Image: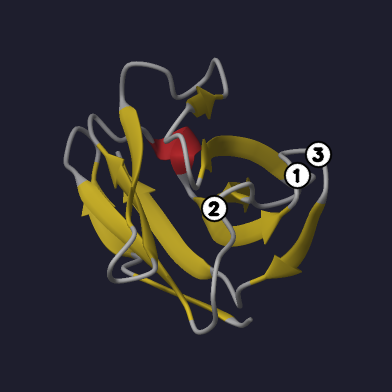
Amino acid sequence: VQLQASGGGLVQAGESLRLSCIASGRIFSSASMGWFRQGPGKEREFVANIRWGAGTTYYADSVKGRFTISRDKGEQTVFLHMDSLKPEDTAVYYCGAGASLGDYTLWGQGTLVTVSS
């Protein structure tokens, strides 16, 4: 399975953006997919996760209420809809997949999100 992320770009604070991550192979219902990000001079941090089968979602406190993760099983795609973006959301966003949130073994190439103030 390979992951292809897209949708990054330059937006102003308060605007919205949607990221997509397409999986090329089969995703098992027990798998988890989600997003991490790495801002300038920062370590990679968790953003959001979704259980592929049940659709259960988890979010970092910093994005709760602003970001929404969803998936389209038919299209083998995970989305990250980001509202009310802040300059501190500026980062390279990576999609990942694995057996669980703490065990991502597959990663996409990353997509850059830049939020200007």
Element carrying mark 3: loop
Looking at the picture, how far across and down is residue 111, in whole percent? 48, 69
For the residues labelled 2 and 1, the Cα–Cα distance comes to: 9 Å
Q: Is residue 44 above or below residue 20?
A: above
Task: Please state which of residues 105 and 40 is positioned toward the viewer in this rendering.
Answer: 105
The residue that label 3 is drawn on is 102
The residue that label 2 is drawn on is 91
Earlier along the polypeptide chain: callout 2 or callout 3?
2
Task: Please state which of residues 30 and 4 is positioned toward the viewer in this rendering.
Answer: 30
Q: Amino acid at mark 2?
A: Ala
The residue that label 1 is drawn on is 42
Earlier along the polypeptide chain: callout 2 or callout 1?
1
Earlier along the polypeptide chain: callout 3 or callout 1?
1
Looking at the picture, how far across and down is residue 96, in whole percent? 64, 59
Which dot, 2 or 3, sits closer to the camera? 3
Horizontal relation, residue 90 to residue 78: left or right: right
Density class for disc 2 (Cα within 10 Å; few <14, some 14-19, many ≥20) is many
Tell me which corner region of the image, top left, top right, bottom left or bottom right, holds residue 94: bottom right
